[in-house]
Amino acid sequence: MPSFKLGRVTADIQRELSDLFREIKDPRVSRLLSIVKIDVSGDLSYAKVYVSAIDGPEATLRSVKGLKSAAGFLRRELGKRLSLRKTPELRFVADDSIVQSAHIAQIIDSLEDEE
């Protein structure tokens, strides 16, 4: 049986984190940062957040370092905004899927131009 609560909590965490990213004042965190995917453990203890910056992989890695240092702040604010018994521990992972998809789109466009 699928866990609908887990899906709802994941969507709530993604919505609130994307809002909280705008409040972080760390200069390492890119303003063009997006959440690609969130994996929440079944007992809601951990949340692995995959992030990607449009600026490129270097900006993504810098942003992950900034987010790791702000993880306590983000977890506290997430706990205030969501009424959960246990607020998950946040782990941030750099993901370059946005850059890869832009590269694939560029290749497809160049193939269409050749035809």
Image: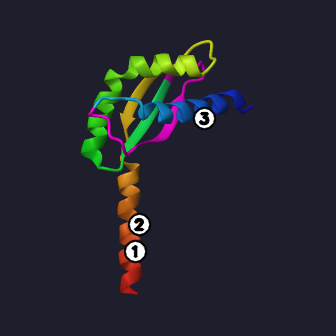
Kindly identify the residue that appears in the image at 62 percent across and 17 percent down: 84
Mark 1 and mark 3 in contact? Answer it, CB < 8 Å.
no
Disc 1 designates what residue?
109
Q: Which residue is mark 2?
A: 105
- Circle 3 is placed at which residue position? 11
Tell me where the magenta segment starts and ends, as one range: 27-46
Residue 50's place in the image compared with 103, above or below, is above
Q: CB of mark 1 within 8 Å of CB of mark 2?
A: yes
Q: Position of residue 31 (x, y in %)?
A: 36, 42
Q: Amino acid at mark 2?
A: Ala
Quadrant of the drawing holding the N terminus: top right
Residue type indicated by callout 1: Asp
> In terms of secondary structure, where does tag 2 sit?
helix
The foreground one among 94 and 84 is 84
Q: How is the image coloured?
A: rainbow
Residue 3 seen? no
Q: Residues within 10 Å of mark 1 (few under 14, many from 20)?
A: few
